[in-house]
Image (cartoon, helix red, strand yellow):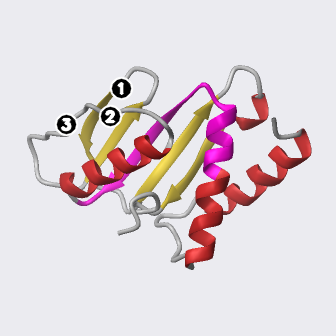
Amino acid sequence: MAGSTEITALRRHLARFSCLEVPPTLSPQERQTLREELLQFNQLSDYQTLGICVESLDKAQAALEAYVAALGGQCTLTLTADHAGPFYIKFNTLNDKGYVNRYDGPSRGVLITYHASEVDEVNGTYGPFPLDLFSGN
């Protein structure tokens, strides 16, 4: 298990994405490091909630499936909407449930909220991260 100092350092590193409207362009090495950091927090959490701000349902579905698979879960949700994009998708990995709402804001990317009962320092919302961080597209 990661120590408190390591968790604090990870939180600090992930916090650089906070309050951004869109994720920054990352080098391949930065993308790999970010994936590793997110997966470390994933191992310390009980479940995650994903928030995805995106232009189209196709991109949202791809991002949702890639992130959930990377986090070790299953996503059986097929996104549908009664309007044209952009969209905000919220998905809970604990119960494989989510919803789609109209979203007119400027933000784009994926937010991850980690929920941990044993390691309180992990709890929090991080991102936005690139839509294709785990799909490599």
- Other residues around mark 2 within 10 Å, as few (<14) / some (14–19) / many (≥20): many
- Place of residue 58 in the rendered image (x, y in percent of width and height, measured from the top left): 19, 55
For disc 3, the marked residue is 78
Q: Quadrant of the N terminus?
A: top right
Check contact, mark 1 vs mark 2: CB within 8 A. Answer: yes
User: Image point 38% across, 50% down: which residue?
Assistant: 66
The residue pinned by badge 2 equals 75
Query: To which residue does mark 1 refer?
Result: 96
Q: Residue at x 83, y 54 (%)?
A: 9
Q: Residue at x 46, y 61 (%)?
A: 133
- Whether residue 26 is visible here, answered yes or no, is yes
Q: Nearer the viewer, residue 119 or 16?
A: 119
Q: Residue 29 vs residue 23: left or right?
A: right
Q: Position of residue 24 (x, y in %)?
A: 53, 73
Q: Which range of residues does the magenta coloring cover? A: 38-55
Q: Which mark is residue 37?
A: none
1 or 2: tag closer to the N-terminus = 2
Q: Secondary structure at mark 1?
A: loop
Labels 3 & 1 near each other (Cβ < 8 A):
no
* Image quadrant in which you'd find residue 13: bottom right
Q: Could you say whether the residue bearing mark 3 is in a helix, strand or loop?
A: loop
